[in-house]
Amino acid sequence: MRYEDMLIDTAYNLAEIENRDIKPGHPLENQCTYCLKQKNPAWYPVADIQVVRIWKINSVYTPEKGGADSGGWYSWRCPRHSFDGKPSLYAENAPQHLRPKYTHRCKTPVLGRPCGQVAVGFLNERWLCDEHARPIILSLRAEELLRAEDDDA
């Protein structure tokens, strides 16, 4: 696997990345993006690090640059900061061939972020999970029943 071929929102083992940067003095180790943000400069064995390509609002697809500069934002994650599987907030802006082959995720805001659960349908112009789709589905069913009663009368 190469950085530029990685799908977004998919965790890859760093040891399987062909064109990864080798840090001088640390050929078999790497650091965690989130540990570094917490001012923890710990080094972890490459086998323990996962790489995730995230698509952000300002991400641009630049395959000609190659490597970790090919588009999106890459994060290196230790076991304590493993990927939660939730999709990028701007995944729909990523090139189609970089999107994982999964079903859509719920876009209903929960505490300022999309819910992220697997969607059961496209309602009210957004993908919704079972929990967030249920009230809308029930309302649509009730309207349909009322229309059917009116037609019968």
Image (cartoon, grey):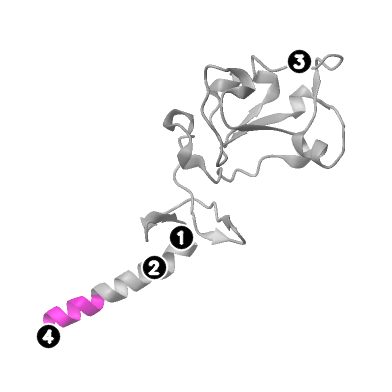
Considering the image in quadrants, where does the C terminus appear?
A: bottom left
Q: Which disc, if any, is residue 136? A: 2
Magenta-drawn stretch contains 151: yes
Give the foreground label among 3 and 1. Answer: 3
Q: Secondary structure at mark 1?
A: helix
Query: Would you call the spot at circle 4 few (<14 residues within 10 Å), some (14-19), or many (20 or more)?
Result: few
Query: Would you call the spot at circle 3 few (<14 residues within 10 Å), some (14-19), or many (20 or more)?
Result: few
Query: Would you call the spot at circle 1 few (<14 residues within 10 Å), some (14-19), or many (20 or more)?
Result: some
- N-terminal of the two: label 3 or label 4? 3
At 37% from the left and 57% from the top, the residue drawn is 125
Question: Alpha carbon of mark 3 to alpha carbon of mark 4: how far?
Answer: 76 Å
Image coordinates for residue 94, horizontal then vertical, percent: 48, 35
Amino acid at pointer 3: Ile
Residue annotated with mark 4: 153
Image coordinates for residue 39, horizontal then vertical, percent: 87, 39
Residue annotated with mark 3: 22
- N-terminal of the two: label 1 or label 4? 1
Residue annotated with mark 1: 130
- N-terminal of the two: label 2 or label 4? 2
Q: Secondary structure at mark 4?
A: loop
Q: Are marks 3 and 1 in contact (CB under 8 Å)?
A: no
Rendered position, 90 above or below 33: below
At 62% from the left and 62% from the top, the residue drawn is 111
Image coordinates for residue 99, horizontal then vertical, percent: 48, 34
